[in-house]
Amino acid sequence: MNSASPSRSPRFKALARTVAAFLLAVLFLAEPVRAESARLVEVSDESQTYVGKVITSDNEMCCLIERTGHLRRLPVSSLKSFRVIGEQFVPLSAGQMCDELRREIGQGYEVGATTHYVICAPSGKGQAYQSLFEEIYRAVEKFYRVRGFRTTEPDGPLVAVVFASQSEFANYCRRDDVAWSDGLRGYYSLRSNRVILFDDPVLFQNASVSSNRAGEGRGTAAVIYPGLRPEFQSMISGTAADTVIHETTHQVGFNIGIHSRLGGTPQWIIEGLATVLEAPGMRRRSAAHTLSDRINSERLDWFRTEYQPRRKLGDLATLIASDEPFQRSVLDTYSHAWAFTFFLTDNPVRSRQFMTFIQRSEQQTAGVAVSAEDRLKLFQEVFGDIARVEVDFQRWMDRLE
């Protein structure tokens, strides 16, 4: 005879979890979830309690955004309790996020907020990094907006952490389950929604920040960095700056409605846009810039000298159909993605088609795997025959100076 209490038996616990999952799906998760009306919920599994809003769910997986911006993917079968604790989800305020970062990172750092950002940076460099991230945000948002992309404001403050040393950065990577290598300078995390970097001494040299209210755009200050190398003035460039710009471009795109954090967006789109925006001329607010300012010279050089001699007819279809080339030939694929994205965004007609394609790609993927055939089918529905597009693209690249 089994003397175990029914409330403690494995069979009872399994049944309880099943019932909880069923009720969760029927009473809450099965409802259409709209960002503007998402409720604040508390969900628990065997090890932790999460507070946030549900952004999507099905019978197997519940995706929840916490008030800190962290994305949690929770198997429904693991959930043991849930409750609605508020009728409206509200992310942490900038002040609350600052307090969270101060507790998390500790001494030797200063934390401050801008219109869109909360920045944790080494003491003495906070103001410079705050202005830098805000400037990149505004430039990237304008890049999309003037090309017809529909953008939205982020749900809450965006977070960037700049560590004082590479060793501190490496330790954080390990805690964040990110594969660290000596060449890794920074990354954007879909899970935490943070940009994580380490400070490069050449980026800011005794930098201070002043403002010029005559600057363009919603009263935005024009940023000046006295003591900074000339090529870093206004919109910085160079190896250290490229990392900041590239990873911040990812972060902005995932928070203003260009990409979805649930995943599924073709990698060539994500990396192509980020590498296009590495070029200073693509981020400047003034229209007075040359073609050379808008070209990512590093990617163009690799495309022509390294990739072009190996390029085969049909490579474009391979890039569109699968993310696999990014694992097989990284530099070739990054340069190819840059070149094709630059081709699409440099012409108003193609840019509008590209906007349509990105929007339809987000609808097509919705966080699930999409076949190569479906990716190619969607591309050709928007742009036409891919073989013809590849010919036009190659001719355009041959003429690019």
Image: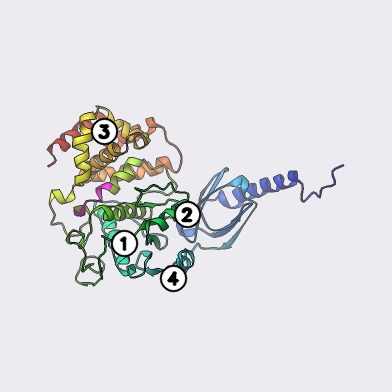
Kind of residue indicated by mark 1: Phe
Return the disc, 1 or 2, that comes first in the chain's sequence: 2
Q: Position of residue 377 (x, y in %)?
A: 34, 32
- Spatial CA span between label 2 and label 3: 34 Å
- Spatial CA span between label 2 and label 4: 26 Å
Q: Nearer the viewer, mark 3 or mark 1?
A: 1
- The crowding category of the residue bearing disc 2, from other C-alpha atoms within 10 Å (few below 14, some 14 to 19, many at least 20), is few
At 41% from the left edge and 42% from the top edge, which residue is drawn? 264
- Spatial CA span between label 1 and label 4: 18 Å
- The crowding category of the residue bearing disc 1, from other C-alpha atoms within 10 Å (few below 14, some 14 to 19, many at least 20), is many
Kind of residue indicated by mark 4: Gly
> Are the residues flagged by discs 3 and 4 in contact, CB closer than 8 Å?
no
Of the numbered discs in the image, which one, if any, rests on residue 34? 2
Of the numbered discs in the image, which one, if any, rests on residue 95? 4
Number of numbered tags placed on the structure image? 4
Return the disc, 1 or 4, that comes first in the chain's sequence: 4
Helix, strand or loop at label 3? It is loop
Q: Position of residue 112 (x, y in %)?
A: 38, 69
At 64% from the left edge and 46% from the top edge, which residue is drawn? 22
Kind of residue indicated by mark 2: Arg
Residue 220 versus residue 20: which sits nearer the camera?
Answer: 220
At 32% from the left edge and 40% from the top edge, which residue is drawn? 268
- Spatial CA span between label 3 and label 4: 49 Å
Return the disc, 2 or 3, that comes first in the chain's sequence: 2
Q: Which residue is mark 1?
A: 133
Asked whether residue 276 is drawn in magenta, I would say: yes
> Are the residues flagged by discs 2 and 4 in contact, CB closer than 8 Å?
no
Q: Which residue is mark 3?
A: 384
Q: Nearer the viewer, mark 2 or mark 4?
A: 4
Residue 316 versus residue 192: which sits nearer the camera?
Answer: 192
